[in-house]
Every structure is written in structure tokens, then in C-alpha cells.
Image: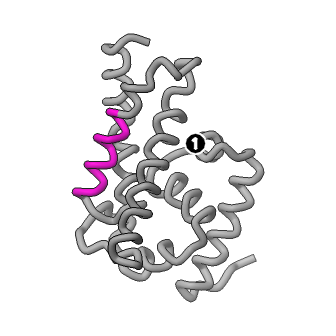
Amino acid sequence: MDREEFAGRVEAVKARLYRAAYLYLGSEADALEAVDETVYQALRGLKKLRQAEFFETWITRILINECHRELRRRKRLAGEEALPDTAGPDQYDALPLREAVRRLPEELRQVVILRFFAGYTQAETAAALNIPQGTAATRQRRALALLRLELGEEESV
């Protein structure tokens, strides 16, 4: 893959990367910085990408790692993850939902963010997290059940 093709593919997925980064980090500035760092790291490591059809999964994995790095840095500095204080995507704007998602265990939160807020399919989510698709489905069901309990909605079976 040459640099022009790389640039075109990055532009095609940039909005999804930003949404995912915003939901992980909770701040527009941090999300933009994470996406920029992701693009930089991806360009530097472009030769490591063996199959171009896995570009989106590959760059999403880089983004997730970058978001985790930023969250670890925040914890070291503040001792505790700070609440987001800026507005973002409409679906995530409600404070109870934001808080409920933030309190999910990390492995469940990853699936929820990628599936429902960043717009990834279940297969893309599983590939990005490097887990089997069945595991992604199980984590999604578990996360949704916990969110329903947290937000006080009754399950209708």
C-alpha cells in the first residue's frame, strides 16, 4: 500500500476512529490527539500491514492501544479517571448513559463503544479486539444486561 492509498483509507475511517476515541477518552481534544497519533503510528508501521483488506481492523487496534495508553497516563497523573466535561456524539450525551458505560468492566466497555457508538459490526468489533466473534457477542449481551440494570430498565423477554 502506498502513501496515497493510505491517506484515502484513513480519510474513509477517520470519523469512526474519532467517535471511538471520543467515547474512550471523553474529550474532543484528547480524541483528536489520539486519532492523530494513531494515524502517525499507522503510517510509521505501514510496512507491518501484511494484507490491505485488514487495514480498518489494524488501524482500529492501534487506536484502541493509543486510548489505553492515554487512560493509563491519566490515572498516573490524577490517580483516577476523570469524567468527560465536553459535549460529544448525541447518543452518548446523556450523563446516566455515559456514567453507566464508564462503569462497565473494560472488556465489556470496549465492545459497547465499538459496536454501538463507533458503528462497527460485530465481526469488525471482534477483529479489532482480536477476540472470537462469539466472545464479542457474549460480551455485548452481558454489557447490555448490565446497562439495563444500571439504567433501571426492565428486560422484556
Q: Sort mark 1 into few (<14), some (14-19) or many (20+) by Cα contacts within 10 Å.
A: many
Q: Up-down: is 31 above or below 98? A: above
Q: Is residue 93 above or below residue 112?
A: below
Q: Residue at x 62, y 62 (%)?
A: 107
Residue 63: percent from left, percent from top: 43, 45
- Mark 1 belongs to which amino acid? Ala
Residue 103's x, y, as percent?
Answer: 52, 77
Quadrant in the picture for residue 38? top left
Residue 6: in magenta span: no
- Residue depicted at x 36% and y 15%: 5
Residue indicated by mark 1: 128
Between 154 and 15, the residue placed more toward the observer is 15
Whole-percent x, y for residue 20 in the image: 42, 52
- Name the secondary structure under disc 1: helix
Segment colored magenta: 29-40
x and y, in percent, of residue 6 in the image: 37, 20
Query: Does residue 30 appear to the left or right of 68 in the view shown?
Result: left
Q: Residue at x 53, y 22 (%)?
A: 49
Question: Would you say 57 lies left or right of 82 here?
Answer: right
Q: Quadrant of the C terminus?
A: bottom right
Name the residue located 48 percent from the left edge and 49 percent from the top edge. 64
Asked which quadrant contains residue 83, the reply is bottom left
Q: In which quarter of the view is residue 95 placed? A: bottom left
Compare residues 39 and 75 and report the one nearer the observer: 75
The front one of 57 and 154 is 57
Left or right? Give the position of 89 relative to 125. left
**Quarter of the picture holding the N terminus:** top left
In the image, residue 19 above or below residue 7 = below
